[in-house]
Amino acid sequence: MHTIEQLNDGRAVYLNGHRVNVADVPIFRKTLALNNQYYDLQHNHPEVHTYQENGHRYDIAFKVPRTVADLQQKRRAYQEIAQSNSGMLGRTPDFLNTGMAVLAERAAFLGQNQYTDFAANARNYAKEVKANDIFISHALQNPQLNRQKAINAIPSGYAGVHTIERNQDGIFVSGAKMVNTMAPIADDLLIFNPPELLLENGDSSYAVAFATPLNNPGVKIICRKLLDHPTASITDYPLSNALDEIDAYIVFDHAFIRGQKYLLKIMLK
């Protein structure tokens, strides 16, 4: 959990064509307050929303269920999370925290190459997220610029995210992803390709997955138009004036990704 002021950490957030401070946008403040109820549940109902492992307590979303009792606890936790926001926040942190637990459990399939050990990176990143209860957002959809061409044949370079350079410390990426929910108020961003994306020969630079802080100097968060009506009563707009999950278009401009957060690279013929 963090305060709205902590999100003014240098992240480049754009709204209606202008760069903004997250703390200055009322609907961002309201949405963060609702999202923080997720963390309040861990403090107020730890018997449901946390579990103990090696002497430490963690968010129950990170627990890999092994018994019926584990599943029952997780079901109750998810039910209370949904009730805390009347089911209107579909991207509370448990959404991707659960995915990180699965990623760590099955990381071996990521393998390694001559540059890094992807499996170890995934396990270590999942461990970092769990230990610090990091709020992750994700972006997987590529901008649909030209469906008739392979990604690598679109000259703009913004039909997806691709590796443009690497050194001993990590990789540099450029490109774009879209429909990134909650990006302005999250901590980290997870980038990967959707399962249905069929990469073709020559698309290898786009076959990449990684995580990065959202205040990475090479990342721009371009928000869609907000849905709230700030001059109107919440009685007239009870939902749109209470929250907005804030979908965004993410632009990468020679963004550096640390080697430890480099999670996947597939070589295509």
Image (cartoon, rainbow, N blue to C red):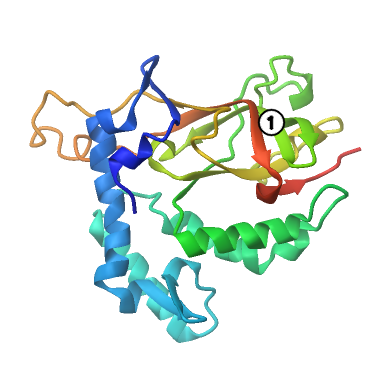
Q: Position of residue 59 (x, y in %)?
A: 42, 68
Q: Position of residue 104 (x, y in %)?
A: 63, 65
Q: In the figure, is residue 124 to the left or right of 201?
A: left
264 relative to 62, above or below: above
Q: In the figure, is residue 85 to the left or right of 223?
A: left
Q: Residue at x 44, y 51 (%)?
A: 135
SS class of the residue under badge 1?
strand
46 relative to 125, above or below: below
Q: Amino acid at mark 1?
A: Val
Quadrant housing residue 87: bottom left
Q: Is residue 238 visible?
A: yes
Residue assigned mark 1 = 173
Location of the C terminus (image quadrant): top right
240 relative to 190, above or below: above
Q: Residue at x 52, y 77 (%)?
A: 65
Q: Residue at x 75, y 54 (%)?
A: 118
Circle 1 crowding by C-alpha within 10 Å: few under 14, some 14–19, many from 20: many
